[in-house]
Amino acid sequence: MENLQLVSISSAVETLTHSANTMFILGGAIMVLAMHAGFAFLELGTVRYKNQVNALVKIITDFGVSTLAYFFIGYQIAYGVNFFSSADELISNNGYALVKFFFLLTFAAAIPAIVSGGIAERAKFYPILIATTLIVAFVYPFFEGIMWNGNLGVQAWFVQTFGAPFHDFAGSVVVHAMGGWIAFAAIYLLGARAGRYRNGRVVAFAPSNIPFLALGAWILAVGWFGFNVMSAQTLGNVSGLVAVNSLMAMVGGTLVAMLIGKKDPGFIHNGPLAGLVAVCAGSDVMHPMGALAVGAIAGALFIGCFLLAQNRFPRFDDVLGVWAMHGMCGIWGGIAAGVFGLQALGGLGGVSFIVQLLGSLFGVVVALSGGFLVYGSIKWIAGLRLSAEQEFNGADLSVHRIGASSMD
């Protein structure tokens, strides 16, 4: 009788654990899903008024095709898991496997959301959706599976050769740097917006709506605590260190962007995002003061790279600065995990600087190769860019046949 009671209690505890873990990761998935609204409003507020509708439509439709691409192809490439089984099998352990897919999907769908901000105001609609499908189905999960699932033996080689795996707790490189460097290829292939450069000098296109830009930044910043903290994926692995490190990096990026950006609202609201991008990789191993430094450096790096790209490379018209934000700050975050994660600098250890450097550079190679292959092929077959007349009229009227208000 006593044994039966123990078995019953053990079964109840196991069921409760599965339920709690499912609810935990579902909460994370919902928070990261909400970040896509942040991507949308950040782009909406930054682009000119005649492209606001297009910004909103791109983000939600990109998410739709990303879901199908990742569900049917990408998730199996990354993790060897598919959902071609009965619903009865899928709901085992309270459907935790399904919710884990949902959570990781929101990461995968961040790739086209990042790209969207860089190619705004001059990209065709359906060719970009096709590119999104290919990126989320093949390019992103190829690298994700290598770094987060041990595919192809790369992580095993790092451990055998250098004594530590590549560490990217919440995706500074796997998500953000991949998105930023894929965007680099798309931005380069599209070329600059008409009228953006005149006689080799930048012509300023002012943001259409600073409040919406700020709203987007705030939604992203709040959702990021689901992005980072809930990357633990189970309640048993959750760490308050990740939450505080995310907070400190966010603050560091904000204040440095304020100082270097001379109180410009665009820079100030992107500063916290730069810090959050950079801290993702090592948020579980750094000391909070290390995270503050990582975020502060990221804030400066974002502004420096954004201005460099806009002023020195006329063909490279990155509307939201996504290469500087996600590409460069993401790489910095990957490398920084191998610096500030060391015990000598107050971290928890278990990381290697050389592995973090090599893994980050590998991410750049995969992203650039995949980005140029996908966007270059589509440019050759169908074209990526709106006609001069469509671009002049704006993507809202040219693509969607409606403006942002009834007065358009």
Image (cartoon, helix red, strand yellow):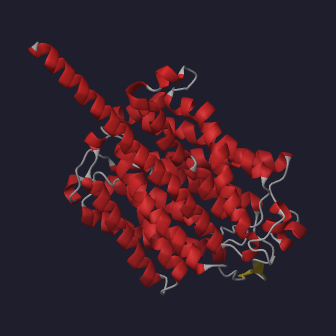
State the residue at coordinates (26%, 44%): 350
Task: Determine if residue 85 is in view.
Answer: yes
The N terminus lies in which quarter of the figure?
A: top left
**Res. 397 image quadrant:** bottom right
Where residue 237 appears, as percent x and y from the top left, is 28, 42
Nearer to the camera, 139 or 3: 3
State the residue at coordinates (63%, 44%): 66
Where residue 282 appears, as percent x and y from the top left, is 34, 53
Where residue 253 appears, as percent x and y from the top left, is 41, 72
Taking 53 as reference, is 226 above or below it? above
Nearer to the camera, 158 or 253: 253
User: Number of marks in the image?
Assistant: 0
Q: Is residue 396 left or right of residue 6?
A: right
The C terminus lies in which quarter of the figure?
A: bottom right
- Identity of the residue furthest to the left in this view: 2
Where residue 344 appears, as percent x and y from the top left, is 20, 56
State the residue at coordinates (51%, 56%): 34
Q: Is residue 217 left or right of residue 170?
A: right
